[in-house]
């Protein structure tokens, strides 16, 4: 076991896959000489050279389109978005091209590409650098969407994403890069379509992902002291959602709270609630409760910024409120 920071876990995944498969390459702004904006590609330029670690111009639409073409011809590109908010400039290439070409070509082309990078609300990064794009892309056919939350699942998920024959959007949270965890010394993979039961419980199912996993586990410690027994599920896969794991939990607890950093209107939580009501309505003893970020551009002011997202005490209050409604 080796104590590893999350950004180094991601770097190890890319390094191992580039060493295993010479069709894998990295491209993006400052990924080469500089080593990536959060040092995920540090040292790879020196090891693999400029043809496999490509520094690109500041032109997200162009290099994303180039990556789609490379994937069509048999390569496995990994795009690093310096900030995931900037990938809105490449929405057409991701949605109309990467997401749909395998279908519109009648299966003649595979699109094995990964689009990864930092996102989420950081510490006073301002509105344009605090984007959560998962809901923007969730409606696009043909994409897989995952959100890592620990060094362990970050490494295993990225290796699986690189090997997948479909386009994978790989969301990392800007405040989790320095998270540290002991990782196995042997190779391992984490499936792209499975949720993780972080804490088994019987009172209420809390569905979450990315940084909010850590807010929920923090709240759970306080809730345990008050006699509550929440079950925590890290969704990990946002598309497709793992309804086998979700459903098994709901049939046990009969209560659900969704905790997300995404905005409430049209967010991931909205889709989860609709799907739970479609599939498991008869199992619910209370309406599904949703804790989401406020529908405003993220303020630069630090105190205002913290008020826009879900904090642990809000999760505690939500569980207490829901359990008070027991029938």
Image (tube, rainbow, N blue to C red):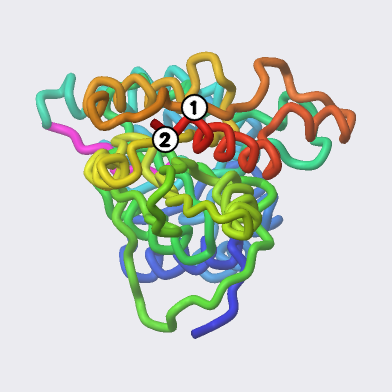
Q: In this view, does 62 lie above or below 162?
A: above
- Please report the residue visible at 43 percent of the width from the left and 51 percent of the height from the top: 231
Image: magenta residue range:
108-114
* Direction from residue 181 to residue 155 in the image, left or right: left
Task: Report x, y in % for residue 206.
Answer: 46, 42
Of the pair 51 and 153, the residue shown nearer to us:
153
Say whether residue 6 is magenta: no
**Numbered circle sitting on residue 256:** 2
Q: Is residue 106 above or below residue 324?
A: above
**Numbered circle sitting on residue 289:** 1
Q: In this view, does 89 lie above or below 183?
A: above
Say whether residue 110 is magenta: yes
Q: Dots 1 and 2: beta carbons under 8 Å? A: yes
Task: Report x, y in % for residue 125.
Answer: 79, 35
- Please report the residue visible at 72 percent of the width from the left and 31 percent of the height from the top: 129
Quadrant that contains the C terminus: top left
Of the pair 10 and 109, the residue shown nearer to us:
10
Q: Is residue 297 above or below residue 33?
A: above
The quarter of the displayed image where residue 180 is located: bottom right
Of the pair 101 and 327, the residue shown nearer to us:
327
* Direction from residue 147 to residue 106 in the image, left or right: left
> For the residue labelled by badge 2, is the local secondary structure a helix, a strand or a loop?
strand
- Please report the residue visible at 56 percent of the width from the left and 65 percent of the height from the top: 44
Task: Report x, y in % for residue 1.
Answer: 49, 85
């Amino acid at each position: 076991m080796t104590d590893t920071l999350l950004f180094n876990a991601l770097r190890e995944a890319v390094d191992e896959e580039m060493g295993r498969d010479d069709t894998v390459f990295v491209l993006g702004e400052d990924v080469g000489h500089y080593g990536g904006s959060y040092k995920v590609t540090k040292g790879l330029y020196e090891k693999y050279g400029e043809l496999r670690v490509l520094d690109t111009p500041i032109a997200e639409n162009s290099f994303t389109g180039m990556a789609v073409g490379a994937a069509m011809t048999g390569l496995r590109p990994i795009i690093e978005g310096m900030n995931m908010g900037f990938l809105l400039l490449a929405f057409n290439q991701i949605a109309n091209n990467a997401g749909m070409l395998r279908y519109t070509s009648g299966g003649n082309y595979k699109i094995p590409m990964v689009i990864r990078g930092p996102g989420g609300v950081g510490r006073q990064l301002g509105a344009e650098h605090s984007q959560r794009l998962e809901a923007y892309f969730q409606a696009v056919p043909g994409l897989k969407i995952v959100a890592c939350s620990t060094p362990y699942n970050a490494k295993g998920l990225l290796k699986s994403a690189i090997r997948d024959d479909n386009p994978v959007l790989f969301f990392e949270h800007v405040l989790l890069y320095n998270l540290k965890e002991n990782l196995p010394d042997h190779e391992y993979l984490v499936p792209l379509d499975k949720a993780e039961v972080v804490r088994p419980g019987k009172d209420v199912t809390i569905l979450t992902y990315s940084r909010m996993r850590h807010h929920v586990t923090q709240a759970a410690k306080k809730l345990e002291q008050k006699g509550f027994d929440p079950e925590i599920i890290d969704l990990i896969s946002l598309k497709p959602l793992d309804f086998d794991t979700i459903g098994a939990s709901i049939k046990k607890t009969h209560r659900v709270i969704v905790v997300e950093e995404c905005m409430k209107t049209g967010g991931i939580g909205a889709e989860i609630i609709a799907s739970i009501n479609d599939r498991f309505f008869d199992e619910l003893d209370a309406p599904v409760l949703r804790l989401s970020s406020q529908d405003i551009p993220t303020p630069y002011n630090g105190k205002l910024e913290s008020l826009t997202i879900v904090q642990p005490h809000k999760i505690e209050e939500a569980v207490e409120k829901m359990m008070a409604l027991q029938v």
